Amino acid sequence: MFTVGCNEDYLTLAPKDELSEATMFSTYDNCKVFAWGFYETLNPYPRGGENNKRHRPTIQDCDADLLENGYSTNGESYLWGRENIPASDADWTEGYNKIRRSNLMLDNLENSNMTDAEKAHWRGVALFFRSFEYFQLLKKYGGVPWIENAINEQDEEILFGPRATRDEVAANILRDIQFAVDNIKEEGDGENTINADVARALLSRYGLFEGTWRKYHGLSGVDAYLQASVDASSVLLQNYPNLMPVYDHIFNSEDLIGQPGIILYRHYIQDDAGYHIRSTNLRSTNEKVDITRRGIDLFLCKDGRTIFNSDLYQGDKDYYAEFRNRDTRILVMSPPPYKVTSSGTGKWSPTGEPADAEWFDEMVRVSGATPDQDLTSPYKQLPDRNWSDRITTEVPNFTGLSPTQTATGYRFWKYFSNVSYRTSSRDYNDGPIFRMGEVLVNHAEAMFELGRFDQGVADATINKTRARGEVAPMQVGEIDAGFDPMRDPSVDPVLWEIRRERGIELLGEGHRITDLRRWKKMDWAIQPKLGRWIKQSDYPAKVIPIQGNAAEGYVQLVAGNPPAFEDYYYLYPLPSEEIVLNPQLEQNPGWK
């Protein structure tokens, strides 16, 4: 549900049964009504298709290196080389259905009763949404059929034509988003609608993706895409100089209207049409997602140094000490260790041991929650609990309450929201779609890839997101080959730190799997996924898998190592039914 204005001009719209392509786009307000249907594409917490990874960005990122699906004891099929060619794929069919809707508007604007500027505005809006869909297709499949106009069954030559090349599709997307940036109204059509800055945010994301894909996959034309990203991000840095000060509030607030750094969001409400189930999923048996050892180790200490070279780090063998002196965003990502006494729902009491309550006050401070025994504040506080408010008596929780159990020891709870208190599957906290946290890390990375990253860029980008985690600023001149001894040596040490910040700021939002694919670094994801250091003797009621079947060590949910990642896996297979329907479509190389 987006905030959309209404006025008396709508009384002059043609009756629904009289609408046709000729009349549907004849006036500005008719176009506005038609455009409402586009917005369903931009739904960060959709209810439908819950078994499809397209609709579950956190589950998508379990195919990468920083998250793990606690139910997948055999490993993700994508990582273990077990992916099959699907008969059908919603990403393909839904994408082309939405592209056709955009093309309907584009085909009919010229004959409308609008000024040239108004026509250009709506052309820009339609191209924004068409580009958004083609971007999803390009990311997944590479070159795909490019359809410039709305087609019907008589247009067989177009409907059953071959795939366009990646170069053609990529260039067309860039062309169309740039048109949207130049022609959509700066103010859009009211609060929280598509405007020029939203188009810039898409261009920031797209230009970085395509530019780095081309660089790391050996294609030409790198700089044009990176420069487009930088140009778009530069304007946004000026237009949105501030961020929401509390990281948890970005994802778990009832209303994001007017919040700094929020470019576009989805406003949900509790009625039958407007709610979602994102928070419920993460607080029930629908999802069991954990952060990996690699993900936890990303978080810097407050002095701006890594856990491998900071005197502030106290090691990972002591549950309570591991989170001390770290980037405070780690507390928003995973609940810190504690113990309480509780016999059921809502009520709890301290154990009497001060160590068991070390993180309670700090969790309230970092999340901006209002502390109370009933736990009714919408933001995170301890103890952890499921959607019905049943208390988890200790973290890490390997053996207790199932909905908040962990597989690796680091439960992912970024989307924990108590807005819909004690209510299942009717969440109505708002969802960010484009926000400055992403734009800042986009800009930093694109500037580095263009050879223009320096301390000034770091201060304008990375150091803003770091400040929200209470981490010392990045000092570019201090980053050398030894800054992180665990760095992939093939990655420049400064770029490594930029990518670190991106991994933290965007954790679990669906970007990581795309990032590893565009960097051609899926080998990071096929390393063993590890969790907490534990002693099996501390859990006599349950056998917890430990690396090497040792008596103590790091949890390893999936035994063994995945096979080497095949290059052809960087592009997904086209659905077989589409190739049967259109013999001119060629399957991506390697898929049989």
Image (cartoon, rainbow, N blue to C red):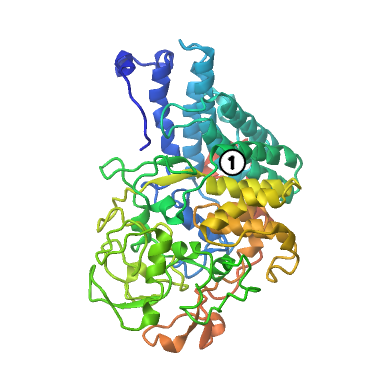
Identify the residue position indicated by label 1 in the image: 237
On the image, which quarter does residue 415 sit in?
A: bottom left
Secondary structure of the residue carrying tag 1 is helix
Mark yes or no: residue 580 visible.
Answer: no
Query: Of 375 and 304, which appears nearest the observer?
Result: 304
Q: Quadrant of the N terminus?
A: top left
Query: Residue at 57% of width from left, 35% of height from top?
Result: 200
Query: Residue at 23% of width from left, 69% of height from top?
Result: 345
Against 476, residue 430 (above or below) is: above
Mark yes or no: residue 228 visible.
Answer: yes
Q: Tell me where residue 487 appears, x and y as whole percent.
A: 69, 67
Query: Residue at 40% of width from left, 81% of height from top?
Result: 355
Identity of the amino acid at label 1? Leu
Q: Tell me where residue 241 appears, x and y as whole percent.
A: 55, 42
Q: Tell me where residue 367 appears, x and y as whole percent.
A: 41, 60
Against 550, residue 208 (above or below) is: above
Query: Of 356 and 399, which appears nearest the observer?
Result: 356
How crowded pointer 1 is (Cα within 10 Å; few <14, some 14-19, many 20+) is rated as some
Query: Of 174 and 6, which appears nearest the observer?
Result: 6
Left/right placement of residue 381 relative to residue 180 reads: left
